[in-house]
Image: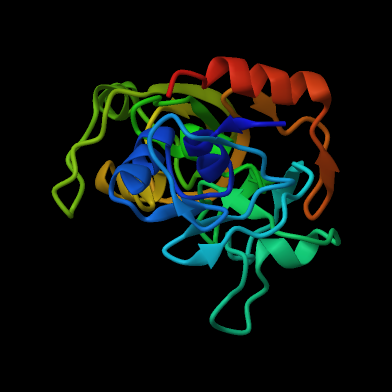
Amino acid sequence: MEERLQKILARAGYGSRRTCEGLISEGRVAVNGRPAALGTKADPARDKIAVDGKLLPAAEELVYVMIYKPRGVVSTVSAPDPRPAVRDLIPLPGTLYPVGRLDVDSEGLLLLTNDGELANRLTHPRYEHEKEYRVLVARHPDPQQLETWRRGVVLEDGFHTQPAEVFPAGKQGKGAWLKVVMKEGHKRQIRETGKTLGLPVVKIIRVRMGSLRLGNLMPRQWRHLTPQEVETLKKTWSGF
């Protein structure tokens, strides 16, 4: 089936549709050996599409998988060191890329897919999709610490965090569980925020990404998204 060329390129992981329109305008895309133009349509199953002279691989069936990433696993396709990568935990063939990141010491929900266009939408700062975490801190927070976290803080590297939803969610010995809902993902943001407020973070579990919920998955367990979950993701983050 013929589709607009920028849509095919975006799905193949070349960036947003606007980015792919730029590739076409710059003359870097060819269809069946001929330079493409904006508005060109192609059938990825029949036509030979190339970017900078490199042919797109044969179209793969789109796959959407969620996994409970355990602590100690890197959120990448492959790791540059002996640590395991999250892609190693999913015994499926083909290309699967993590959508967003969880640092190696954090755990919980991670989405992997070969749908480059959807991955770009889910990670683009423009959309600010919500992420929800269960966070264990080493001591019981006082109301002022929680209120400061909610308003936003300036981290050691100068980054000013956006307002977030932060609520007590139970006690554990000398520590306490918090529910944290935020729309950004600065590097180690939750840990650095806790450190700044005098609330050392012991554990982080991501339980929701947008409309996706971790549910009953246990560490290392994974499953395919349901058609309804995929449809909801696409409806929620459409608009490029």
Q: Is residue 5 left or right of residue 95?
A: left
Does residue 36 appear in this view? yes
**Nearer to us in this view, 112 or 115:** 115
Q: Is residue 156 left or right of residue 144?
A: left
User: How was the colour assigned to the protein in this rendering?
Assistant: rainbow
**Nearer to us in this view, 63 or 86:** 63
- Residue 134 image offset from top left, x and y in percent: 58, 35
Image quadrant occupied by the C terminus: top left
Residue drawn at (51%, 41%) of the image: 10
- Residue 129 image offset from top left, x and y in percent: 46, 25
Residue lying at the far left in this picture: please name it: 158
Report which quarter residue 157 is drawn in. bottom left
- Residue 135 image offset from top left, x and y in percent: 53, 39
Residue drawn at (83%, 34%) of the image: 216
Residue lying at the far front in this picture: please name it: 34
Residue drawn at (84%, 42%) of the image: 223
Considering only vertical position in the picture, is 74 above or below 158? Answer: below
Considering only vertical position in the picture, is 224 above or below 156? Answer: above
Residue lying at the far bottom in this picture: please name it: 82
Total labels: the figure holds 0
Residue drawn at (71%, 19%) of the image: 231
Image quadrant occupied by the N terminus: top right
Does residue 109 appear in this view? no
Q: Is residue 66 left or right of residue 40?
A: right
Considering only vertical position in the picture, is 83 above or below 47? Answer: below
